[in-house]
Image (spheres, rainbow, N blue to C red):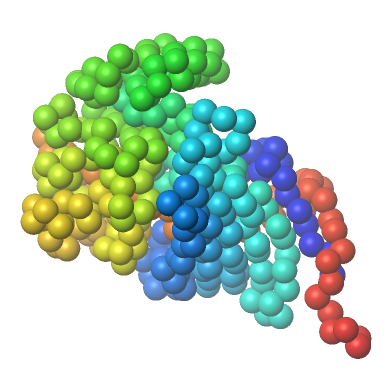
Amino acid sequence: MDVLVVNQSEVAQLLPMHECIAVMEQALVTLARGDAILPLRPVMWLPERVGALGMMPSYLGDIAAMGLKAISVFPGNHGTEYDSHQGVVLLFETTHGRLLSIVDATSVTAIRTGAVSGVATKLLAREEAGDLAILGSGTQARVHLEAMRLVRTLRRVRVWSQHPENAARFAQRESERHGLTVEAAPTAQAAVEGADLICTTTSAREPVLNAQWLTPGAHINAVGSSVKFTRELDTAAVAGARLFVDRRESTLNEAGDFLFAKQEGAIGDEHIQAEIGELLLAQMPGRRSPEEITLFKSLGLAIEDLASAQHIYAKAIEKQMGTWLPIGGRHANA
């Protein structure tokens, strides 16, 4: 049995952001319709939580595919030559259980995370929103700038990092890449004040976004924390916003931004307004007024990786990209 291996550079070619946004919309709709299997992800933490290995299985009925993402998460890699998220997505078909493809997970994770925030922003941000603040200057900051440009017309972009030199490099690089002016802000507050689009993409363990800085009508994509013991938003920011999520069950079990506010008694489970898939199906209302603050808490779901891998696999065959490797899979006596 031959398996198609798709490397990091090929993923970037086969999964452009505008296509990934459409793929994510369909995956979230499939989840909302109940045609997906999505166990909570088991995570193995190394001593002193210096790094982790996450295992994310899933199934999507509409594409008859199942898969597993195995990914290491090492936040300390920020600012080094290594990505903070490294691993592979394994794509299987569901008739015989054959392994079809092995896809680089670093690039898939980056692109699909930005794309899901793009979906949420299309649904929740004001139509005229275009003053963007990005907290963080790593990979997710880069892909979120790309996604936000696709779903809203940007008037101004500010970036802040806990390491000012990283923010300066990001501002120069992305200004040249996109042909727009990206400003490096000296503080998180200076980046956020007046912004109506905010993306938090940091590796912070404690809040970097304060409710007092927020402008009425802002939309926030909270992306950086995907575990229960870290958060990027303070309790007041979460409590004061209408909260939307990629998946309720995951949020209730894994989202530090939500769980800290809940533990402090500021909110309850009912604070979750809807899943993004429910908004796409018009089952629940989204933004209700120009003044309210909306918050999308992104955790990242295995179905997003699976849908991305299926899209990449189909396009790689069409474009004759990737590398076919003989791995096995037939009965030993066949």
Residue 257, above or below 53 = above
Seen from the viewer's position, the closer of residues 64 and 71 is: 71
In the rendered image, which quarter contains the C terminus?
bottom right
Residue at left offset 84%, top offset 79%: 330
| Residue 227, visible in the rendered structure | yes
Q: x, y percentage for residue 91?
A: 65, 63
Left or right position of 224 against 74: left
Which quarter of the picture shows residue 309? bottom right
| 8 versus 193 height, above or below | below
Q: Residue furthest bottom?
A: 333
Which of the 4 quarters of the picture holds residue 107? top right
Residue at the spot 43% in from the left edge and 51% down from the top edge: 49
Which residue is painted at 49% across and 15% down in the image?
Answer: 169
* Quadrant assignment for the N terminus: bottom right
Residue 97: image location, x then y, percent: 69, 77
Of 155 and 12, which appears nearest the observer?
A: 12
Residue 24 image point, x, y percent: 47, 52
The answer to whether any part of residue 281 appears in the image is: no
| Rendered view: 216 above or below 334 | above
For this view, does 269 lie left or right of residue 106? left
Q: Residue 117 location, x and y as percent?
A: 38, 43
> Which residue is farthest left?
265
Q: Residue furthest right?
A: 334
Q: Residue at x 15, y 57 (%)?
A: 263
Left or right of 275, for residue 70: right
Task: Note whether 126 is above or below 238 in the view shown.
Answer: above
Q: Residue lying furthest front in this view? A: 47
Q: How many marks?
A: 0
